Image (tube, rainbow, N blue to C red):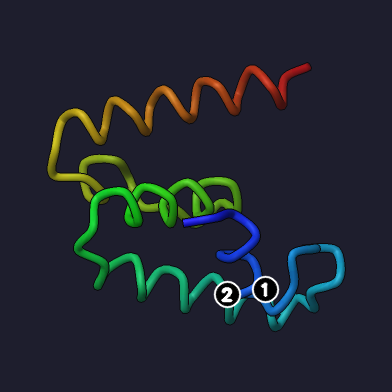
C-alpha cells in the first residue's frame, strides 16, 4: 500500500496542508474503520503506520496479534522518533 495512495483514499489529497480539519477527522475515522476490517497483515501495518503519524493509532497490543508485527511497529516508532527529534 503506497503512502500517496493512502493519503488520496482517506483525505482526498496527498498534501495534508490542503485538507480541511473536518476532512482530516473524517479521513482518520474512515482509516480506523478500514483498519479494523483489514485482514492482510501488510496492509494493516501500513494503515497503522499512517494512523500513528496522525496520532490516532491503537495501542500495539490491540492493533497486532503477532509479536513480529508489534516489534516491527516498535521499530517504526523508534525510527520515526529519531527522524522527528532532529
Q: Residue at x 40, y 69 (%)?
A: 32
- Percent across and percent down for residue 37 are 24, 72
Q: Residue at x 60, y 24 (%)?
A: 81
What kind of element bears circle 1?
helix
Task: Reply above or below: 63 against 33.
Answer: above
Residue 24 image label: 1
Residue ID for mark 2: 10
Task: Reply above or below: 55 against 70.
Answer: below
| Quadrant location of the C terminus in the rendered image | top right
Disc 2 versus disc 1: distance between alpha carbons? 8 Å
- Percent across and percent down for residue 7 are 63, 65
Task: Reply above or below: 83 against 3.
Answer: above
Q: Which of the 4 image quadrants contains residue 79?
A: top right
Left or right: residue 67 compared with residue 57: left
Q: Earlier in the sequence, mark 2 or mark 1?
A: 2
Q: Residue at x 64, y 17 (%)?
A: 82
Q: Which of the 4 image quadrants contains residue 69?
A: top left
Q: Nearer the viewer, residue 13 or 17?
A: 13
Q: Residue furthest right?
A: 18
- Percent across and percent down for residue 43 are 35, 56
Q: Residue at x 33, y 28 (%)?
A: 72
Q: Residues within 10 Å of mark 2 (few under 14, many from 20)?
A: some
Task: Reply above or below: 10 against 6.
Answer: below
- Percent across and percent down for residue 24 are 67, 73
Left or right: residue 52 compared with residue 59: right
Residue 77 image label: none
Q: Closer to the camera: disc 2 or disc 1?
A: 2
Amino acid at each position: 500500500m503506497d503512502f500517496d495512495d493512502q493519503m488520496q483514499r482517506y483525505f482526498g489529497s496527498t498534501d495534508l496542508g490542503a485538507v480541511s480539519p473536518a476532512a482530516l477527522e473524517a479521513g482518520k475515522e474512515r482509516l480506523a474503520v478500514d483498519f479494523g476490517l483489514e485482514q492482510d497483515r501488510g496492509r494493516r501495518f501500513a494503515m497503522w503506520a499512517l494512523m500513528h503519524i496522525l496520532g490516532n493509532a491503537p495501542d500495539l497490543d490491540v492493533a497486532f496479534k503477532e509479536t513480529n508485527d508489534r516489534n516491527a511497529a516498535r521499530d517504526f516508532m523508534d525510527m520515526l522518533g529519531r527522524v522527528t527529534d532532529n
